[in-house]
Image (spheres, rainbow, N blue to C red):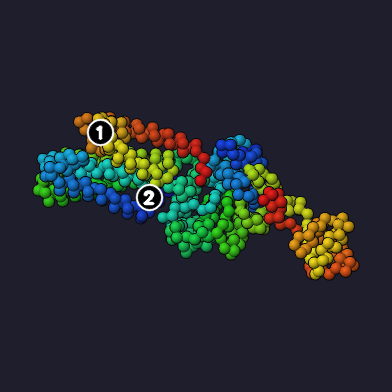
Amino acid sequence: MSFPLALDVADLSKKYGDRMALSHANFEVPMGSICGFVGPNGSGKTTTIRMLLGLITPTTGSGHVLGESITEPEKYLPNVGAMIEGPAFYPALTGEQNLTVLAKLGGFDTGRIQGLLDLVDLGDRGDSKYKTYSLGMKQRLGIAAALLPNPKLLILDEPTNGLDPAGIQEVRALLRKLADNGTTVFVSSHLLSEIEMISDYLVMLRLGQVIFSGKTSELLAKQQPVIVAKPENRSDLEKLVKIATSAGHTATIIDESVHVTGESEFSAKFNKAAFEAGIVLASLTPVRASLEDTFFEMTGE
Amino acid sequence: MWNVFRAELTKLKRPSLSLSTIAAVAFVTSLTTSLLFLLVDSPEGNGERGVRIGRDVLALPSGVTISFSNAAGLLGIVALCIFAAQTAQEYIYGTLRNLLVRQPSRMKILIGKLGSMKLFAIAMVTLSALLAVSLSYLFAGVKDIPTQAWGTQDAQIAVIQTFINVLLATIGFGIFGMILGLLFRSPISAISIGVIWNLIIEGLLSIFVTNIDRYFPGQLLSIVATGGNERISYQYALFTSYGFLLAGLAIVAILFKRRDVAN
């Protein structure tokens, strides 16, 4: 059975007392994609995830997960793996026992546990108590637990927290592999460079409101590319600004460089004009706005 | 529900919990049995609240069960602590969200949890019964108390009846602990409030206020364990205590079902 959309949220809101944690959110996530879920702390990411998992009740609005309404989580949760707000396990049980508890609870095959521990590089520590695990190991166990149902949709809240660079790279590769095999991945992270690298889609929140949802490439394409020119002589900075503005481009001095808005094609013309004006450039680099730049610009953080 | 039951048993079987429970059950059973027999001739009494249980009573067919039923109150406190901790720890560790993602039916979680803890209580009471009977024979020999009547059919019936009564009392205390665990969502708060309520508030008020124990679930459960007394019948104690507990359980079940899981 296939579903056109893995997630579909319409006008979803959650109010705690007088505080609106999420306000009239609308977004869609296609099946088989990796969707980044980003926003500053307190923007409503975890509240949204909790509503999608049936842990909290929306104040208004509706949502569908794998084609089923979020009012009936029992219909879709057997196909969903999730790690919410970091890993949470029983400290006195081993990693393997913790997974056994969840496998029995969900009616999943306990024979998969060792394979999953191997997959997250905990194969030789499965019989150690959870309380002896490092933060990175706890995080890996959380990912293994989320994979227990062999999910069609994987919802991960900050999965790379506490992981070293190699671990982050492994998680990135794992998520890509899962998506290639048809699993939809909905992942929140504050590591925007990671999200930029892996996500096809993006949902961006600010103060409980969705400020962007769509393809990551579309969002980044909206941003004006910038050419960064650094003259050998600091006194040439003003001259470079004049050259750029006379060509119809916006230019600003940041530190010891001039930032000129414009496509990379303008670089050659700009370089030539600078040369003709007797300016020697130490470097000239076309820069496309990163997700981080876009995020800060859009969220005003 | 069966899945929840199996999952909960995995948690209950962990050595730290099972070994400490065995130690606690062994301690309270040995304590009540040794006090009952070794202080049999003491003018200060050898039963609860200074009650004297003489050699002639101990020599009756039901004599073999007295120390076991005397242990019920303390066994109940052990059950209260375990049920409260097993319920409230899900909030403290944040594991409730994992449970609810894997089993969205909150009622199934609650019923499965209760079922597994009842099984744990059966194991506790069985261990206590075996130990109480064994120690009773041992201490009866030490104090020259005749035990011929303990091998009769009447004694066997008394043991079975006492087992059922102590089990009902222990599970009742456990349900009380579960209610507190769901209400306070913290093992320390639930256990301390439960123990203070049962041992201090109910205990003291029952001494100083006549007949108030008719309305206290902890006192009534202790009476259930002993099969009733001259003031409060077994039936009244059983139905009233379980009435209170089931009403409390229904209220916290509604709270548990409706409450957002936001931690």
Given residues A175 and B3, the one toward you in this image is A175
Say which residue label 2 marks.
B12
Amino acid of disc 2: Leu
- Please tell me whether residue B220 is drawn above or below residue A83 in the rendered image: above
A260 sits left or right of B219 in the view: right
Identify the chain of the residue marked 2, using the numbered disc in the image.
B
The disc placed on residue A31 is none
- Where residue B151 sits: x, y (%)? 15, 44
Q: Please name the residue shown 63% across and 56% down the image.
A: A191
- Where residue A49 sits: x, y (%)? 58, 45
Amino acid of disc 1: Phe
* Quarter residue B247 falls in: top left
- Please tell me whether residue B105 is drawn above or below residue A249 in the rendered image: above
Residue at mark 2 to residue at mark 1: CA–CA distance: 39 Å
B174 sits left or right of B62 in the view: right
Say which residue label 1 marks.
B208
Q: Please name the residue shown 43% across and 47% down the image.
A: B89
Query: Under tag 2, what secondary structure?
Result: helix
Q: Are marks 2 and 1 in contact (CB under 8 Å)?
A: no
* Quarter residue A252 falls in: bottom right
Q: Is residue B82 visible?
A: yes
Q: Of the residues under marks 2 and 1, which one precedes in the sequence?
A: 2
Q: Can residue A71 be seen in this view?
A: no
